């Protein structure tokens, strides 16, 4: 779980440094949530739990359905060209993954993941603020050139 979260955070650092709307917290949460859902599904397959096909379909439905709820909190402000709500949407998705893990009875995994979730939100906010200060300290021409080179 830690590695999945850290991989997302590393990608998030790159996104932050390029001024993109996703960042350390959002992509760290996506990595953690993906890991949790995969672990829940794999746990059924490995242990041969009766009804695992039905449970697997339920997990798929939750993950799909929760995406619509998350999409509802993402807002783009046309005046400032800023996107808000991505971390909240990712938090909703990871919370659903935590619910799935609790539903399969993996309490220790749920508690560890919840701890990681909270650490990521707290430390991720600090890292993102530092990256934003770094980003804003660069001259506008340099930032525009970096964005043009990326696209």
Image (tube, grey):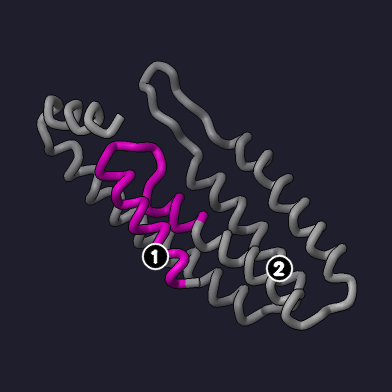
- Point out residue 49 in the picture as x, y percentages from the top left corner: 83, 79
Indicate the secondary structure of the residue bearing disc 1. Answer: helix
Residue in view at x 24 percent, y 26 percent: 148
Q: Which mark is residue 41?
A: 2
Magenta residue check for 32: no
The quarter holding residue 142 reads top left
Q: Which mark is residue 147?
A: none
**Pointer 1: residues within 10 angstroms few (<14), some, or many (20+)?**
some
- Ranked by sequence position, the earlier of labels 1 and 2 is 1
**Pointer 2: residues within 10 angstroms few (<14), some, or many (20+)?**
many
- Point out residue 37 in the picture as x, y percentages from the top left corner: 65, 63
- Point out residue 139 in the picture as x, y percentages from the top left corner: 10, 30
Is 117 drawn above or below residue 151 in the view shown? below
Main structural element of the magenta stretch: helix, strand or loop?
A: helix
Residue in view at x 33 percent, y 58 percent: 10
> Where are the magenta residues, as a range?
2-30
Indicate the secondary structure of the residue bearing disc 2. Answer: helix
Q: Is 105 on the left-hand or right-hand side of 150?
A: right
Q: Which mark is residue 6?
A: 1
The quarter holding residue 36 reads bottom right
Please identify the quadrant where the C terminus is shown.
top left
Numbered disc in front, either 1 or 2 = 2
């Amino acid at each position: 779980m830690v590695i999945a979260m850290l991989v997302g955070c590393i990608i998030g650092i790159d996104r932050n440094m390029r001024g993109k709307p996703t960042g350390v917290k959002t992509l760290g949460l996506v990595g953690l949530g993906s890991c949790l859902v995969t672990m829940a599904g794999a746990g059924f397959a490995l242990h041969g739990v009766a009804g695992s096909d039905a449970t697997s379909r339920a997990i798929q439905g939750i993950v799909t359905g929760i995406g619509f709820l998350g999409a509802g909190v993402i807002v783009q402000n046309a005046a400032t060209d800023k996107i808000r709500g991505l971390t909240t949407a990712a938090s909703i998705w990871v919370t659903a993954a935590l619910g799935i893990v609790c539903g399969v009875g993996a309490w220790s995994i749920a508690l560890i993941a919840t701890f990681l979730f909270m650490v990521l939100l707290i430390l991720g906010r600090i890292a993102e603020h530092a990256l934003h200060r770094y980003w804003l300290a660069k001259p506008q021409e340099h930032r525009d050139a970096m964005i043009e080179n990326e696209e």
